[in-house]
Structures are given as structure tokens and as C-alpha cells.
Image: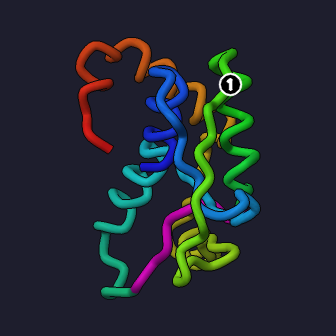
């Protein structure tokens, strides 16, 4: 959801709300990869818990920079204090998905962000009305 928000806010010239200093790390996975993993997991797995995600976290500030680069537009960053429950880094351990399902993400972050930007721009008239 943050990628959509950041694309929307930067494209529409709205302030981009950044909690903390942006050094928090998160992993982001393109929806097609998650859908593919979900379909694979529907096959009998013995009701095991399997993480789907990306095991390559990126800082939030680097994600914002990537979106700025791809859009050719700077974000108007509005900094806010970090939430007390926020954690410095999260990412999925996908070892089990690799072993059990033969799954791992195929779309690299840069490609996925570019696809998301293209989608937003193609659907901008109605997508910009989505409240985030």
C-alpha cells in the first residue's frame, strides 16, 4: 500500500507523509508474484504456514528516491515522528516457499515499481480519487 500512496502523493503534488527518518527497511513484493505463490500454495501442502514475500529489504527513503527517479518528480516530504510500535526492519523468510513450492519472486523491485507507476498513470483519473 505504501508504494501506491507514494506514487499517488508524488504524482499529484501532495505531501508525502514519512514516519521516522526513512531508514526503516521493508520488503516489497509485486502482486503477480504473490498471486503465483498463493496459487502454488493451494496445492496440498499439509496445512503448513508459508511466507510469501521478498527477502531483499529496502529503506523507505530509497524507495521514495526510486519512485522520484522513475516519475521524474520530487516528493514534498512531510516528516512525522516514528510510531512507537514501528520496527527498524522487516522482511519475509521465503526459504520454506522456495523448498516446498519452488517459489520465489520473479519481479525485481525496480521493475515492479515501474509497472505500478505505469498502471497509476494509465488509471490516474479514477485512481487519484482513492483515499489513502
Q: Nearer the viewer, residue 73 or 106?
A: 73
125, above or below 18, in the image: above
**Identity of the residue drawn at 73% across and 56% down:** 59
Mark 1 highlights which residue? 74
Q: Please state if 128 lies on the left or on the right of 59 as rendered.
A: left
**Identity of the residue drawn at 49% across and 74% down:** 51
Element under disc 1: loop
125, above or below 26, in the image: above
**Identity of the residue drawn at 63% across and 31% down:** 75
Q: Quadrant of residue 109?
A: top right
The picture places residue 125, in percent across and down from the top left corner, at 28, 13
Residue 127 in sight:
yes
Q: Nearer the viewer, residue 93 or 80?
A: 80
Per the rendered image, the range of residues in magenta is 49-56
Q: Is residue 113 magenta?
A: no
Q: Quadrant of residue 48?
A: bottom left
**Identity of the residue drawn at 43% across and 45% down:** 31
Q: Magenta: predominant secondary structure element?
A: loop
Residue 104 in sight:
no
The picture places residue 68, in percent across and down from the top left corner, at 68, 27
The picture places residue 55, in percent across and down from the top left corner, at 68, 65
The picture places residue 49, in percent across and down from the top left corner, at 41, 84
Q: Nearer the viewer, residue 77 or 129?
A: 77
The quarter in which the C terminus is drawn is top left
Amino acid at each position: 500500500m505504501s508504494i501506491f500512496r507514494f506514487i499517488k502523493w508524488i504524482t499529484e503534488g501532495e505531501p508525502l507523509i514519512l514516519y521516522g527518518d526513512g531508514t526503516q527497511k521493508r520488503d516489497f513484493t509485486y502482486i503477480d508474484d504473490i498471486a503465483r505463490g498463493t496459487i502454488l500454495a493451494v496445492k496440498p501442502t499439509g496445512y503448513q504456514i508459508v511466507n510469501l514475500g521478498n527477502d531483499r529489504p529496502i529503506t523507505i527513503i530509497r524507495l521514495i528516491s526510486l519512485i522520484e527517479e522513475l516519475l521524474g518528480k520530487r516528493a514534498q516530504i512531510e516528516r512525522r515522528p516514528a510510531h512507537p510500535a514501528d520496527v527498524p526492519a522487516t522482511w519475509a523468510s521465503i526459504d520454506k516457499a522456495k523448498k516446498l513450492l519452488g517459489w520465489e519472486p520473479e519481479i525485481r523491485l525496480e521493475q515492479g515499481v515501474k509497472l505500478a507507476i505505469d498502471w497509476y498513470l494509465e488509471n490516474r483519473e479514477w485512481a487519484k480519487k482513492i483515499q489513502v
